[in-house]
Image: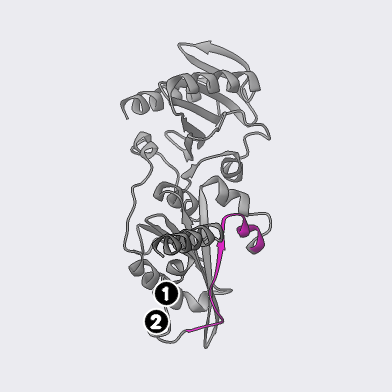
Amino acid sequence: MKYTSCVIVLLFLLITGCTGGGGDDLKEFFPSSADVPGIREDGKSHIYVGTKLFDYMNGGAELYYEYGFVRMGVQRYQTPPGGVTAEIYEMDLPGNAYGIYTFDTQGEHPSIGQDATYEGGLLSFWKGKYCVRIFSEGEELKETILVLGQAIAQKILEEGERPDILNVLPSRGIVGDSLLYFRGMVALNNAYFLSHQDVLSLREGTEGITFQYKPEAQPLRVIIVRYPAPPHAEEAFQNLLASEIIREGTMNNEIFQGKSRKGYGATTVVGDLVILVLDGPDLKTVTRTVRSLAQSGGEG
């Protein structure tokens, strides 16, 4: 009898594991009308696990998989002025939830979750391993969206650490909210198109940041990638040189410099980091910028 009970329990665990299981606790993050007066659920919430995200969105799911997507939940609400949609994305790591959030950082920054942005009827924030998007078709539901976001954030009890690579950021000079944390080519090319080829060798275990940087008069494009170990970084650096992202280049004190698609570029490798600066007005500017970033990156 005991053996039969054990078999039944094991079969149950296998079945729930294969179907995605554990989806109900994600639904618990969605507030009810009791939590947020003035709204009501418009139908049931839905959970999309693993590859099922393709059933919810066409052409955008690859980005989420690059950040370690686990599952997402969606709940629609009705209020007297109109409808609101709340999406909660669960990623494998808090840093990846932060990464997805960095795609929506242009706007005002309300105090919701760990970081939040509101602009044009869209609220985005991250907390723990969750990234949340709440949106409507217009600005008239802004206050409802913010209250709904705060209610969801309060239901997510855990918080997470930001990616370590952020420690290499310069203390000043970053343009606005241009910072993006990426894990692969899809995200990087969405922020700044570099190449159709994987010229930076963005294999599993790599992480990167890109941002506009204005240490002087003209904004530059900076891309910094951290690799699992220095040999991987050196291999990626050699691959980058062979790609001719920087053309007619020469090596000068361990910095490779030359022409780029929109001006001039320079790159170097420091330990487990590859640093790339593009769109400069001249060789002197991009070389000086790479050297400065390499010094701060090496210290980080």
Q: Which residue is mark 1?
A: 148
Image coords of residue 11 (percent x, y)? 50, 60
Vertical position of residue 298 compared to residue 144: above or below: above
Image coords of residue 97 (percent x, y)? 45, 52
Quadrant housing the N terminus: bottom left
Say which amino acid is labelled 1: Leu
Residue at 31% in and 26% down:
299
Q: Which residue is mark 2?
A: 36
Vertical position of residue 217 compared to residue 120: above or below: above
The front one of 85 and 123 is 85
Location of residue 288 by image quarter: top left
Q: Are marks 1 and 2 in contact (CB under 8 Å)?
A: yes
Q: Which mark is residue 300?
A: none
The front one of 102 and 67 is 67
Q: Residues within 10 Å of mark 2 (few under 14, many from 20)?
A: some
Q: Which residues are magenta?
A: 40-55
Sequence-first tag of 1 and 2: 2
Say which amino acid is labelled 2: Val
Q: Is residue 271 magenta?
A: no
Q: Is residue 243 left or right of residue 25?
A: right
Residue at 52% in and 52% down:
69
Location of residue 249 by image quarter: top right
| Residue 6 visible in rendering | yes
| Residue 118 visible in rendering | no
Q: Is residue 97 left or right of residue 15?
A: left
What is the distance, in whole Å, between disc 1 and disc 2 at their CAs? 7 Å
Image coords of residue 130 (percent x, y)? 43, 58
